[in-house]
Amino acid sequence: MRYVKAETILPAELVKEIQKYIQGGYVYIPSEPQKRKKWGENSGNRAYILNRNKTIRNKYKDGNSIENLASEFFLSVESIKKIVYVRCK
């Protein structure tokens, strides 16, 4: 997130109104709920993890042990169990 000077994007009257409430501070204006993105959507991490977890589940179904999967994917045994035993939505 980057900061933008209010006077460069807002009308002068609105800046004066906001100054009644805050002077020289930072104001966070959130995105509209329907425009918010979920964690990892911009970076691609969300898709990567979903694909990795699908691969782990498939390898488990093919007979790989939880311990071997933990070693292969550099995750703890408990993390692999959570991935393997979760019900897909």
Image: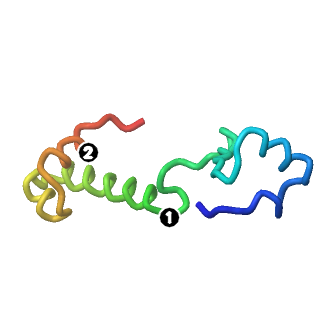
Residue 88 versus residue 65 in the image, above or below: above
Q: Marks 1/2: CA distance?
A: 22 Å
Q: In this rendering, would 56 be left or right of 10?
A: left
The residue wearing badge 2 is: 83
SS class, disc 1: loop
The N terminus, quarter of image: bottom right
Name the kind of residue labelled 2 in the image.
Answer: Ile
What's the mark number on residue 43?
Answer: 1
Q: Residue at x 11, y 49 (%)?
A: 77
Q: In this rendering, would 55 be left or right of 38?
A: left
Q: Are marks 1 and 2 in contact (CB under 8 Å)?
A: no
Query: Mark 1 or mark 2, which has the lower sequence index?
Result: 1
Horizontal and vertical percent position of residue 66: 11, 50
Residue 88 versus residue 37 in the image, above or below: above
Foreground: 77 or 68? 77
The C terminus, quarter of image: top left
Foreground: 76 or 59? 76
Residue 39 versus residue 86 in the image, above or below: below
Q: Which of the 4 image quadrants contains residue 87? A: top left
Q: Residue at x 48, y 51 (%)?
A: 39
